[in-house]
Image (cartoon, rainbow, N blue to C red):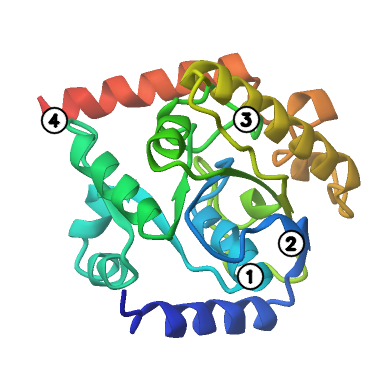
């Protein structure tokens, strides 16, 4: 697969990260497969997560991740050509089978495919419910699942907050867990539960080891309630997502 677009995009991102002096820490680099297919599974707390989740695999093993993303991104006049040039995979949420088939084909061809099993950004910054697609793809392609946790990216640009793409010196933690190998007897629901448990343990550790603290009471928005922050609880976040979905559907009608 020719990659004419991906390398300069990676170079531009790395240059921007250096310019902002982001304090990026990658742990678990040795867990990224050096070759062969793998489903990279990341939590989702920021609009920039695909950059950082992909960076973890690239910096660790020079692997380029093909992310599954909603097809609206591919229809945009600016992001569309870039997404197609990097061979990411468009997902039509009204009919996901073509995207699923394309992802499995890429995995069988030895690619790393990136998936956000929560589907949308978590407003609570805790893990939402996982869809089983990642486990099913890994089983169909006979490849491992690679759990990845990001923390700190929500401070740059997340749902419901103004973006701050010029924020400097922000710590960003990337935790890569041990690959999860599947057997033919594994059920997707059970594998997804194991995956979520592994990622939750990584998330808790990333949060507890994060080097920054809020600058004051008004800066506690990026911390979950259980850590003394003012982010919505998981239930409040779910209610907010449901309201947003209803409003979007009403606008379409």
Nearer to the camera, 164 or 91: 91
Query: Residue 195 — which label?
Result: 3
> Counting residues from the N terminus, which is met first, the one under dot 1 or under dot 2?
2
Residue placed farthest to the front in the image?
Answer: 184
Q: Residues within 10 Å of mark 4 (few under 14, many from 20)?
A: few
Circles 1 and 2: CB atoms closer than 8 Å: yes
> Counting residues from the N terminus, which is met first, the one under dot 4 or under dot 1?
1
Q: Secondary structure at mark 2?
A: helix
* 206 over 15 or under it: above or below: above
> Counting residues from the N terminus, which is met first, the one under dot 1 or under dot 3?
1
Nearer to the camera, 200 or 213: 200
Q: Residue at x 50, y 56 (%)?
A: 50
- The residue identified by callout 4 is 252
Q: Position of residue 102 (x, y in %)?
A: 26, 49
Query: Residue 61 — which label?
Result: 1
- Distance Cα–Cα, label 1 vs label 2: 8 Å
Query: Residue 250 — which label?
Result: none
Circles 2 and 4: CB atoms closer than 8 Å: no
Q: Position of residue 247 (x, y in %)?
A: 27, 24
Query: Residue 29 — which label?
Result: 2
Left or right placement of residue 173 versus residue 49 in this view: right
């Amino acid at each position: 697969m020719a990659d004419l677009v991906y390398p300069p995009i990676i170079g531009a991102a790395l240059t921007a990260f250096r310019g902002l002096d982001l304090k990026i820490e990658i742990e678990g680099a040795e867990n990224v497969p050096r070759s062969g297919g793998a489903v990279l599974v990341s939590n989702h707390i920021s609009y920039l997560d695909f950059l950082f989740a992909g960076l973890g695999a690239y910096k660790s093993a020079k692997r380029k991740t093909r992310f599954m993303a909603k097809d609206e991104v591919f229809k945009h006049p600016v992001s569309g050509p870039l997404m197609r040039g990097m061979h990411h995979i468009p997902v039509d949420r009204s009919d996901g089978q073509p995207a699923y088939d394309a992802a499995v084909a890429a995995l069988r061809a030895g690619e790393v495919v990136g998936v956000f099993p929560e589907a949308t950004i978590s407003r609570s910054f805790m893990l939402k419910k996982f869809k089983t697609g990642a486990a099913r793809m890994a089983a169909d392609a006979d490849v491992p699942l690679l759990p990845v946790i990001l923390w700190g990216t929500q401070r740059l640009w997340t749902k419901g907050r103004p973006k701050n793409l010029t924020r400097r010196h922000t710590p960003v933690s990337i935790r890569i867990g041990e690959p999860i190998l599947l057997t033919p007897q594994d059920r997707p629901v059970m594998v997804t539960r194991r995956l979520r448990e592994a990622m939750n343990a990584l998330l808790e550790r990333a949060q507890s080891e994060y080097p920054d603290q809020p600058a004051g009471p008004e800066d506690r928005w990026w911390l979950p309630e259980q850590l003394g922050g003012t982010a919505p609880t998981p239930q409040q976040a779910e209610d907010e997502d449901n309201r947003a979905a209803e409003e979007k559907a009403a606008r379409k009608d």
